Every structure is written in C-alpha cells, then in structure tokens.
Image (cartoon, rainbow, N blue to C red):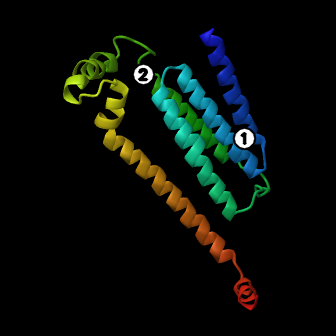
Amino acid sequence: MEIYVNVVLMGMLAIIALAIVRVRHLFAAVMLAGVYSLVAAIVFVSLDAVDVAFTEAAVGAGVSTLLFLGALALTTRREKVVQGRSIVPLVVVLAVGAALVYGTLDLPKFGDPSAPVQTHVAPFYIQDTRDTIQIPNIVTTVLASYRGFDTLGEVVVVFTAGIGVILLIGRAHLSQRRPDDDKSGEEA
C-alpha cells in the first residue's frame, strides 16, 4: 500500500512540475509552486521524515510563496514573451542534472545498515543524547542542539535572499516610476 501512495504522490509532483513549466501566468505559477511544496512535504511524511516535512511546508510553501507574491506585487503578473528560443539553458539544465545523478552513484543504498551514517553518527545520537543534552526526543536534540547553528545559518540564508530580492525588485520598480507620478500625487 505504501508504494502506491508514494507512486501517486510522485506522479502528482511530476504533473505539478509540468504545469509550472507550461503556465504563463506568474501568479498561477507561484500558487502551483506552493502546492508542489505541500505535496513534497506529504512525501516526506510518508518517508517518516516529519521534521523535513515541517521545514518544507514552512519554508517551501509558506515563506517562499510569500516572497514570490511580494515580488509579483512589485512586477507584472504575466511572463514576458521571449522572441526566439535558445538551446543553451536546456543544455545547462541537462548538464547539471547529469552531474547531480552522477553524484548520487557513490551514495549508499537507502536504509543500508553498513552506511557510515548508521555505523558512526546514529549510534552516538541514540546512546548519548539523553545523557548529554537531556532531551528525550532525539530528532529535536539533533535539530535544536547539535545542528542549531546549521539551522540558524539556513534561516539567515533564506532571510538574506528575501531581502536581496526585495531590494533588487524594489529598486527596479522605483527606477521605472516617472517623475510625473510624483507631481500628480502632490497636486491631488
């Protein structure tokens, strides 16, 4: 039964991804991206990675969608029509995809008991977290204590990216304003 659920969820992700690529209305694309993140969060729940699902739902569906909507408020809702298509982006995407797939070839198999994470790190967390950190939940201990600075760094990266997008788009929006806009506002 679990395999069928995962197949349906992965099929939904593929359909949503194709819809995002095909749609030209940017608001619809942003909403579809939020739905994609929610379905991805459900996939993580089905894989028993609830903490990752929570992060995906909060950052992917929540914060990212909010940032995209903020960017849309400063720009147009329609994608600019491109005259002529270049094959270079497709080649770059395929090359990066091939490099990523090549990088996964050396990874241990999913759930392999002889993988380094199962023989080195996991036993330490299971045996020592209760005595050292004194929190009974191991996942919370790993995320909040052992990886606390890592999580803080991720939050700083997302926050910095959001501020950068707002500054870049806001600057472009201000440079497009005509001087007559300010005068008409003063006269009214």
Q: Nearer the viewer, mark 2 or mark 1?
A: 1
In the picture as drawn, the residue positioned furthest to the top comes out as: 1
Which residue sits at x=70%, y=27%?
Answer: 12
Quarter of the picture holding the C terminus: bottom right
Query: Separation of disc 2 and disc 1 at Cα?
Result: 30 Å
Residue underneath mark 1: 20
| Badge 2 amino acid | Leu
**As drawn, is 175 to the left or to the right of 150?**
right
The spot of residue 64 in percent (x, y) is 58, 47
The spot of residue 1 in percent (x, y) is 63, 8
Residue underneath mark 2: 107
Q: Nearer the viewer, residue 57 or 161?
A: 57
Q: Report the label total.
A: 2
**As drawn, is 54 to the left or to the right of 183?**
left
Cβ atoms under marks 2 and 1 closer than 8 Å: no
The spot of residue 133 in percent (x, y) is 23, 30
Q: Quadrant of residue 139?
A: top left
**As drawn, is 187 to the left or to the right of 109?**
right
Local packing at callout 2 (Cα closer than 10 Å; few below 14, some 14-19, many 20+) is few
> Could you tell me which secondary element the residue under label 1 belongs to?
helix
Q: Quadrant of residue 78?
A: bottom right
